[in-house]
Image: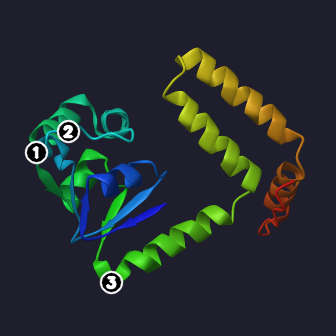
């Protein structure tokens, strides 16, 4: 997860794009100015950006080297949400705790399935998702989660 504020340019943006979730402060400015220096955004920039914001917007951002504000980055799907600079750390912490409260194996496998969705045809992705679901059915966390739901109590996941 990335907490972003100030200038998020070049390698900083490349690093942020490698994160699963990006939360920006209102003062954040995003850009890939590499073409203005005679280079292209390496480190996966030309590959990750179109997947996040679409080809047209990625072309505009990369080919101009322009910067965009946090609210535009959010509207384009580059960041998940925008908060005030004062709230950034608390917001990231809240979200991290919400994720960490879930079953670790389920979170891990859900991330893997989502990542595979970018590279697999839909039918194969659904088959992979079903295979991962079958694996999870044999875990203690699955049993704990369903028991906790039936008993109307918070689950106590152990990652097993």
For this rendering, which residue is in front, 130 or 40?
40
70 in relation to 97, above or below? above
Residue 42 placement: quadrant: top left
For this rendering, which residue is in front, 83 or 66?
66
Q: Residue 75's x, y, as percent?
A: 24, 50
Residue 141 placement: quadrant: bottom right
Q: Residue 74's x, y, as percent?
A: 27, 54
72 in relation to 4, above or below? above
- Which SS class for mark 1? helix
- Which SS class for mark 2? loop
Residue 36 numbered mark, or none:
1
46 sits left or right of 18 in the view: left
The residue pinned by badge 2 equals: 39
Identify which residue is drawn at 25% across, 46% down.
Answer: 76
Q: Residue 4's x, y, as percent?
A: 34, 66
For this rendering, which residue is in front, 51 or 99?
51
The residue pinned by badge 3 equals: 86
Q: Earlier in the sequence, mark 2 or mark 3?
A: 2
């Amino acid at each position: 997860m990335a907490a972003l504020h100030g200038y998020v340019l070049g390698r900083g943006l490349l690093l942020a794009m490698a994160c699963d979730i990006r939360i920006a402060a209102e003062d954040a400015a995003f850009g890939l100015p590499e073409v203005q220096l005679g280079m292209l955004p390496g480190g996966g920039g030309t590959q990750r950006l179109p997947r996040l914001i679409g080809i047209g917007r990625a072309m505009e951002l990369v080919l101009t080297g322009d910067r965009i504000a946090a609210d535009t980055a959010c509207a384009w799907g580059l960041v998940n949400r925008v908060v005030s600079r004062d709230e950034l750390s608390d917001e990231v912490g809240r979200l991290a705790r919400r994720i960490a409260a879930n079953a670790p194996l389920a979170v891990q496998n859900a991330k893997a399935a989502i990542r595979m969705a970018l590279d697999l045809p839909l039918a194969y992705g659904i088959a992979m998702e079903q295979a991962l679901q079958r694996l999870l059915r044999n875990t203690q966390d699955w049993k704990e989660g369903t028991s906790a739901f039936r008993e109307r109590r918070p689950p106590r996941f152990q990652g097993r």
